[in-house]
Amino acid sequence: MQGGAARGEEELRALWRAFHDSRDAAARERLILTYAPLVKFVAGRLGAGLPSHVEEADLISYGLVGLIGAVERYEPERGVRFETFAVSRIRGAIIDELRNQDWVPRSVRAMAREIERRSAELEHRLRRAPTDEELAAALEIDTTELHDALRQISTSSVVALDEMWAAGSERESASLIDTIGDDGAPDPARILDSSETYEALSESIARLPEREKIVVALYYYDGLTLREIGDVLGVTESRVSQLHTKAVLRLRGSVRGGADVDFGQPSSTAA
């Protein structure tokens, strides 16, 4: 079995050499077919949080465009596994197409921005994450309306945390800066900005209410689905979706609001 795996790896290396040396069309086609399952994987993950009218087959067709671009732009000498590089490209292609279609209602986008803004303001003032009741009061709605809004927003949050991606059996990770083609010398300002953003995001995750922090860790780092996370926490999938959406909005607000926001110790009732 190990010999078969070794032969498979050697065949892949030979395909990459053939494609990079002569842009061989047959090698390109075989590489695309070999890595096509990545498209279904990414489309499945994204589709789980989208409205039912968004067909997975459409997501797969959008993702194939990203896979083809990844094959054509991949640079093995940079030391990043192709799977890691391709997942980000595939996901980006799907998200770009969804954005172009603008299928998210304006009212949902407006509510997401308002929750994000109010949450950041309350965190700055209270020095902790606000409770649902406090956030609802700031929005001048009740908690039921807040939960309904979070459910609607959760179906539109196709871009949540793109800073780091992990793929492959070895759980290798790379930041978005690793997936950008090198057109010459690296841009130090861009690298610094990416590093500072990731650092601010990491600090913000550490200050999330405990249950939201668990959801973020299980979803983004352990790859569990919302249903599986619900089983771990003993809550419904809908409740996990709400916790995930609140965490994302808190993180967006805190990172955009600047590094001077001190969250303090979150309240035990914040989640």
Image: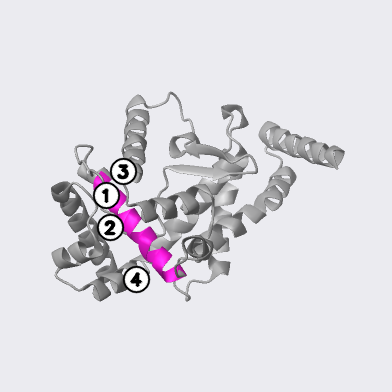
Sequence-first disc among 2 and 4: 4
Q: Amino acid under label 2? A: Ala
* Outermost residue, front side: 268
Residue under numbered circle 1:
266
Residue in the foreground of this view, choosing between 169 and 262: 262
Image quadrant in which you'd find residue 63? bottom right
What's the residue at 25%, 64% (across, down)? 132
Q: Is residue 15 left or right of residue 158?
A: right
Res. 152 mark: 4
Residue under numbered circle 3:
204
- Residue 235 at least partly seen: yes
Query: Is residue 238 one of those drawn in magenta?
Result: yes
CA gap between label 3 and label 1 equals 12 Å
Query: Is residue 84 one of those drawn in magenta?
Result: no
What's the residue at 45%, 39% (across, down)? 176
CA gap between label 2 and label 3 equals 15 Å
Callout 2: 10 Å neighbours few (<14), some, many (20+)? some
Residue 70 percent across, percent down from the top left: 57, 44
Q: Look at the image and give the residue range highlighted in magenta.
A: 237-254
Sequence-first disc among 2 and 3: 3
Colour scheme of this structure image?
A: one colour
CA gap between label 4 and label 3 equals 24 Å
What's the residue at 31%, 43% (across, down)? 204
Residue in the foreground of this view, choosing between 127 and 80: 127
